[in-house]
Image: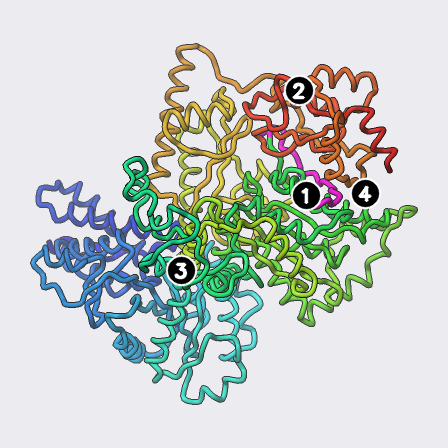
Amino acid sequence: MRGHTGLAKGKNQEIATPESAWRKRKDAWEHLGYVLSEISSTAQEDSRRRENEREARRLLALLRAIEPYWANPGLEYFTQVATLIAEGRSETATRLVYQANQGFRAYTQYFDADGHDLGAGESPERSAAQGQEQLPGARNVPQVEILLVDNGPAEEIERFKEEILEQRQGTDPFHYNFVVVPSVQDALVAIVVNPSIQSVVLSARYTLASSRKLSTTLHGFITGRMAGYFTSGHQIQGLLDLEQILEKLRPEIPVYLIAGVALESIAHEITGRFRRIFSRNDCMDLHLSILAEITDRYDTPFFAALQKHAKRPGGVFHALPISRAASVKNSPWARDLVDFYGKNLLLAETSATSGGLDSLLDPQSSIKKAHELAARAFQSHRTYFVTNGTSTANKIVHQSILAPGDIVLVDRNCHKSHHYSLVLAGANVSYLEAYPLNEHSMYGAVPLEEIKGRLLQLRREGLLHKVKMLTLTNCTFDGIIYDPRRVMEECLAIKPDLVFLWDEAWFAFAGFHPIYRQRTGMTAAARMEAEQQTAAYRQRYAAQQASLPAPGTAQEPENDDYWLRTRLIPDPEQTRLRVYSTQSTHKTLTSLRQGSMIHIYDQDFAVRNLNTFREAYMTHTSTSPNYQILASLDIGRRQAELEGYSLVQRQVDLAQSIARAVSRNKLLHKYFRILNTADLIPEAYRESTTANPVRDGLAVWDKSWQHDELVVDPSRLTLDISRTGVDGDTFKHTYLMDGHSIQVNKTSRSSVLLMTNIGTTRSAAAHLIEVLVKIAEGLERQSRIDGRVLAMGTAESPGKVPLPDFSCFAPEFAGGGGSGNMRAAYYLTYRDPATQFLSSAQVKEHLGAGQRVVSAVFVTPYPPGFPVLVPGQEITLGIMRYMDLLDTREIHGYHPDLGYQVFTSQALREYALEG
């Protein structure tokens, strides 16, 4: 075995991007175990043995680069394995690698009553089964990692670690080990690469640069985040700089500082920046602080109260016969409900709002606390739970802000709940147009130029004072993401009190990843508020004001061209940040169906919107909310704070794995293509030139998301199927769902949207790829049989017809500035006979004769899922041509046997006369 002494040698590999590091690290340990077992085999040929030795060296080089940033198994454990291999003791090394891999397969470590580690992944039961002594008091608890930044003497660091770890007890709710790094760069690498880190402990003993070789992209990302910091040369200021960078990368984790004996002399310099300051002798307090903070994030006040309530004996003389399973547990006809869902669910079904529980409509205890914890997690001023989905959340926000006669700017392609909300609110709607992607039969997002242009138009027409709100979808169904900060800054420069509603139904997960987070409404608002308070910002604002021309007027609109081309800076004295985000927690984080949240960052909420919001919340919230949904929202928040970063990393990595498989497999690439940034976002809306920023590395991804007006969510994959000869709806139902039980959500004429989420597994991703290969093989066989080349559609297919823009509101419902009163049109249909039904041919006949045809209702085809017609909108020949060529099976508001519901000419004349 001495012939293997060269195995531990070899050049270190560079660290991969953080999104794939978890997978490559796990795979490397698992593959190393296999390779070592092969090497240990005596039956191997020399050539096969040499091949395995080369592979072992490669794997060791990879792990040598990654493992220093993890505590478990960690660098010391890896070094032991590498030493054993170098000494030719492959069998012993194999056993250690096996132990490490057992740890990867479980999310927990096992400890005895004194907190001693029983081994990575080695449960007491497994130890006993292998003839090992089972230590008393061993129990299954989560294992987390703490980052210690310290470049002091190794023996001092080890002594410090031992003194802290001695404080651990078997009754602790979880256990931790330390990742020790000497430099700022290493600390930042650890934070982005290792999502298991839950706290950071800084010391004043640090260097700036890492001595390890970092990949070009990771080094670029780290140096980019350090730009503008560490310029003073002062050690304390350097610690403050590092804390600020860490806060932007991982705001959910606390940062502690350990200082020398004179720490009280520097406390005044760093007040409020660190969670707490300790001396090196305060090991017990540091240990207890680490436990307390993570326990606080683990706390789920409403879920805990509901569990406690379910375990209490009692009688029900209230509503809800199913409470405590009373009406079903002994029923021969309904007992299967208990068998299927289990007793706990029904024990937790109750109408009680006391006894530790709380009222959603007037929270005072557990729900109130759960709201506060969610606000902390999502960086909002206030957060409210919603149990009727984001459709209801949108209605609550719109009704709380808008009054009849207010003008609201809305993306026409937003979710239907916004359109119906605006009918209820009675506001005048000014629809904004997203750029079309005609080739793919879908819309993109609304360009900032379109938004600013509409505001400037309303200003020229003297209607800016009526504008109340801007509503946009972030991200869109197809994964196109705005830059909320830039949108809000430039709009507030024109209208300083504009209210923003970001529909983030598909974006709840984004707050838990450093690159995604900057594109959320809450984070953008918080960073705007912080920056506007600086002297540098005020100087930039003053400089721009000196160069801006006077606002344009109806007689002289040319000045507005300059406003349109300039990146505007809002007035810090006049601007009021009033930002709302609605999120479907159940769509992208852990929650039962319809679990949603409203996040509020409103500087004027208490004085301008508290009462109206409460009334809107009362209007749309059930007096019998589902407690299981509320509990799942509580749990979802806990999970996001503790492992959200890890889960989002995996979500992105698995999506990119699918994309790589489609592009690299020749057969898949023949029939399928994943649309990239260049396909979905025109060059005018992005500074970056890369087609796939994530693929090009962390630095490129970070830079493009900091500067591009619009970006694409890398976890949402638009699969172009145009080369299959199958339309999207048929592909979804016949090929994927019926054929292979693969669920997808949205389709277009020529595409299918594939989404990964925090629950997506590697096996699920592999299954999808396998299914696509099977479908491609079937198409290949069919094309050979038919002797033809499959092609998508004809020259007259909807994919070739330009997607219709919003035409205009009929003059009877116009509200100025291109806006319209949909509420008036909606309720006009209640009059009899105000409407009639016309077939497509009849509508075109009326239009050909020069007559107006005005829609009385929403007409929404699925796909694409947005209203092509709204109440009060004039129908055009272009819209009719598009509708005639649609072959979707579902069109809301259109009756195949009757046609389109439109207003009669007489009803419009009478309404106009009423004035």
Q: Quadrant of residue 546?
A: bottom right
Q: Nearer the viewer, mark 1 or mark 3?
A: 1
Task: For residue 250, say whether it is visible.
Answer: no
Q: Which residue is mark 2?
A: 899
- Magenta-colored stretch includes residue 805: no
Which badge, 2 or 1, is on the more N-terminal residue? Answer: 1
Which badge, 2 or 3, is on the more N-terminal residue? Answer: 3
Q: Is label 3 in a helix, a strand or a loop?
A: helix
Q: Tell me which segment is drawn in magenta.
A: 425-441
Q: Amino acid at mark 1?
A: Leu
Q: Which residue is mark 4?
A: 817
Q: Distance of mark 2 from mark 1, alpha carbons? A: 26 Å
Q: Nearer the viewer, residue 571 or 741?
A: 741
Q: Nearer the viewer, residue 900 or 644?
A: 900
Q: Distance of mark 3 from mark 4, alpha carbons? A: 48 Å
Horizontal side, residue 384 vs residue 845: left or right: left
